[in-house]
Image (cartoon, grey):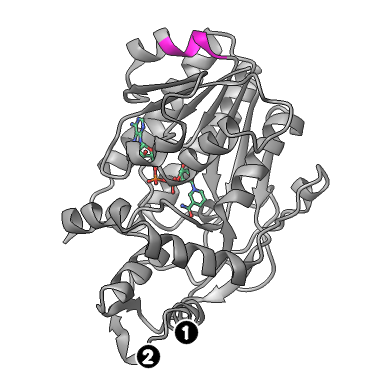
Amino acid sequence: MRVLVTGGAGFIGSHYVRSLLLGSYPGHEDVSVTVLDKLTYAGNLGNLAPVTGRPGYTFLRGDITDTRLLAEVVPQCDVIVNFAAETHVDRSITGAGDFVTTNVLGTQRLLEAALEADVRTVVHVSTDEVYGSIGEGSWAEDEPLLPNSPYSATKAGSDLLCRAYHQTYGLDVRVTRCSNNYGPYQYLEKMIPRFVTNLLDGERVPLYGDGLNVRDWLHVDDHCRGIQLVLEKGSPGEVYNIGGGTELTNRELTGLLLATLGKAWEMVEGVPDRLGHDLRYSVDWSKLRALGYEPRVDFGDGLAEVVRWYQDNQHWWRPLKQRTA
Ligand code: NAD
């Protein structure tokens, strides 16, 4: 199988590529993987270092909005897994243009190229944020999309384009919507790496508002196994929620990180809340469970392992921290 992984140099895409090429998904020993990534500030070839030089692996620097490039690359693959996106909510609040270009226009151009090339299957990686905020209970896949940030609005737009390309042209495209991920190689602007690296450097950590916003945390390895399951056993045109990690308020997560690193609450600095900050996300993932999905990584173990990873891999994040300082 020839897989095109767009956005494969980012946090989740690179985990997927490493898993695929290093044998985590049985039955794909003969896989070949092409990563197409623009290498924005969030893309990092260091994330792919463990597979660089392996047979069957190719990296191409490029943009998913580049139709000429897509016309060359897409016909060389059997399936596409699309991780390419602008992903940071705070950046979307200060400037939404790149989010519209990559997340909406880029996805449409990728779908069009897949249709032209008669690609077998496209898996489009989306987010639980497209549903908006939920007070109680969990969203099923047929809930209306009520995104509240420019980021989630552009992701919702891309999801709807996937639906339209299936309904109108019969393209086999499947959408996944996952909760908050944590794991190694996550860019420093996101909460867990930011807090861990700040605390390792003896710096305070910024906690939004009252800290009572609730997120469901899932290890990136469980997310990627869910994506692979959707590729292998999902159905064309369907949407699959991926979740089932651990629901925590930001305050609770902050407390766990402080305890893991032996720091006191005085290291926390309250900062004004994010504009339009959704209170809670929660997905019902029983549809994916019916395909055999179950998250495997215990949150306590996973968090401790990730903290250790940032402690042990300072060569990876120190240059990024200098860049963002
Ligand atoms: P990331 O920001 O770490 O990586 C995004 C990657 O896309 C980068 O390598 C970047 O260079 C690349 N990219 C950006 N614009 C591009 C373009 N125009 N053409 C080609 N490549 C481009 O993001 P991530 O956290 O790995 O998220 C991957 C996907 O998963 C996104 O679609 C995101 O919406 C979704 N998602 C993320 C989470 C999470 O908690 N991080 C949760 C659910 C869903």
Name the image quarter holding residue 274. bottom left
* Residue located 49% across and 76% down the image: 253
Q: Percent x, y for residue 230? A: 69, 36
Q: Is residue 298 left or right of residue 264?
A: right
* Residue located 23% across and 58% down the image: 321
Q: Percent x, y for residue 294? A: 75, 53
Circle 1 packing at 10 Å, graded few (<14), some (14-19), many (20+), is: few
> Which residue is identified by label 2?
265
- Per the picture, the main secondary structure of the magenta-coloured stretch is helix
Asked whether residue 238 is in view, the answer is no
Q: Quadrant of the N terminus?
A: top right
Q: Nearer the viewer, residue 108 or 146?
A: 108
Q: Amino acid at mark 2?
A: Trp
Name the image quarter holding residue 296. bottom right
* Residue located 29% across and 72% down the image: 198
* Residue located 41% across and 36% down the image: 48
Q: Is residue 236 above or below residue 183?
A: above
76 falls in the magenta region: yes
Find residue 111 and name its label. Answer: none
Q: Nearer the viewer, residue 72 or 194?
A: 194
Q: Percent x, y for residue 200? A: 32, 73
Looking at the rendering, the stretch of residues picked out in magenta corresponds to 73-77
Q: Amino acid at mark 1?
A: Ala
SS for dot 2: helix
Q: Percent x, y for residue 184? A: 46, 54
66 falls in the magenta region: no
The CA distance from mark 2 to mark 1 is: 9 Å
Q: Is residue 172 left or right of residue 287?
A: left
Q: Is residue 126 left or right of residue 261?
A: right
Q: Is residue 36 above or below residue 138?
A: above
Find residue 259 and name its label. Answer: 1
